[in-house]
Amino acid sequence: MKTDQKELKILKIILWVYIVLCIIIAGLNYGYARNASDDVAKFITWGWHFYENWIKTIFIIIGSYLTLKILKDKNTTMRKKNLIGFISAALVVHIIGPILLGNSELYFFTMPLPWTTTPLQLLSTESSFYISRISTWGVNGITIALVFFVVYSVVIFVGTLLLGRRWQCSTICLFNGFAAEVFDQAIPLIGKKKKNVKESKVKLLYGFKWIFFAVALFFTLYWVLLLMGVSVPGEPKTLGMIENYKYLSGELLMAMFFWVAFIGRGYCYYCPLGTLLGFIGRGSGQKITTNNTECINCGKCDDICPMSIKIKDKAKIGKAVKDMNCVGCGRCVDNCPTKTLSYSTRFLDSVNNKVDKY
């Protein structure tokens, strides 16, 4: 067996283990632990935190190494930056942060509104999330978690204003972005790797995008109104549970299903936060420049784009690609044989212009 085939096999095994462990431990944590004895429940919760923080970080580091080994003969300039970003984010969120702040659940607060309303629920004494955490975290612990959320959210939004959607989706996203890059060579786990996603499936996924975005905005509005003292229908505990089930079924399990049978970026097609960041990315001037040299019409950019964006047609006429669905992964840039493609924003352009002057 060739070296790269061995590395690919190991990468697939790691991803399978990650998925299976996640389903088992999440099932125990969100299901069985509620009816178990205190000691058993604490052990399950500890196992969940250990898996989500330490095991996940170890898998990201090993997976990044294996991916680069598999791609050793290809240009991986952008990919290396992505992987360095994910490793750094994992170390901060899953290892350094929990140790310094004494909270093993900081990963709950690394996806800003409207993706999750967990921080808003933590502000409401009526929510099941607040009730379940106040006894273990205390007021100081809750304050620390909320401050962390605010700081992390500012980092994401400011970073997106400067660097486009690439900043979150292809550099620090620890929900789906990391898997799409770290385990790209192993996805899908079943079947052959797809060059292009059928247009009908793309339209369907983009249809889901607006549905999930609307649902996310609904939950956000509900908790904002509740915190403002406005009388709203519905039981806060029930709404919190419904959102939790939405996360487990429509996001966590679906993301993993895409890794198994589709493409790594499957969930990115309809991620609510990604949709919002797409608008911000457009405001930042995010684009794929296509006229650095000359397009030879090979189509390699279209073949490798995980978001099924039509790049070649724009490149043939030297027109920049400005698509809010672009996650800025840079695969098209790395894959272009003539180096005519590059990723940029207004901020990056200004920085490059200043460097060129010197």
Image (spheres, rainbow, N blue to C red):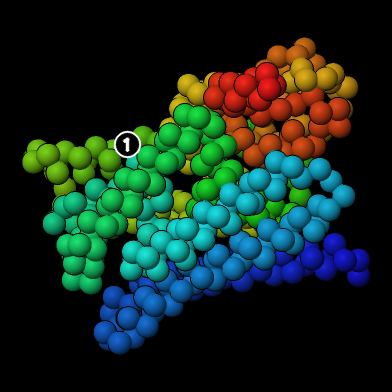
Percent x, y for residue 57?
55, 65
Percent position (x, y) of residue 86? 57, 52
Residue at numbered disc 1: 217
On-image quarter of the C terminus: top right
User: Which of the two residues, 333 or 353, is positioned nearer the viewer here?
Assistant: 353
In the rendered image, residue 212, in percent from the top left (x then y), is placed at 41, 39
The residue shown at (70%, 45%) is 79
The local crowd at label 1, few if under 14, some if 14 to 19, many if 20 or more residues have their Cα within 10 Å, is some
Q: Residue furthest right?
A: 1
* Picture quadrant of residue 129: bottom left
Residue found at x 67% / y 33%: 308
Image vertical order of residue 118 relative to residue 286, above or below: below
Identify the residue shown where x is 53% and y is 31%: 164
In the image, taking residue 17 as reference, residue 245 lies left or right, namely left
353 lies left or right of 9: left
Q: Quadrant of the N terminus?
A: bottom right
What residue occupies the far front of the structure in this picture?
358
Q: Amino acid at mark 1?
A: Leu
Specify whether 358 is left or right of 8: left
Residue 296, can we see it?
Answer: yes
Q: Image check: 151 left or right of 71?
A: left
Q: Could you say which is closer to the camera, residue 231 or residue 63?
A: 63
Q: Is residue 229 above or below residue 65?
A: above
Q: Position of residue 50 (x, y in %)?
A: 46, 74
Image: 258 above or below 13: above
Residue sitting at 30 percent across and 87 percent down?
39
Image quadrant in which you'd find residue 2: bottom right
103, above or below 199, in the image:
below
Q: Nearer the viewer, residue 264 or 181?
A: 181
For the question of whether residue 313 can be seen, the reply is: no
> Residue 230's quadrant in the figure?
top left
Check disc 1 and report its element: helix, strand or loop.
helix
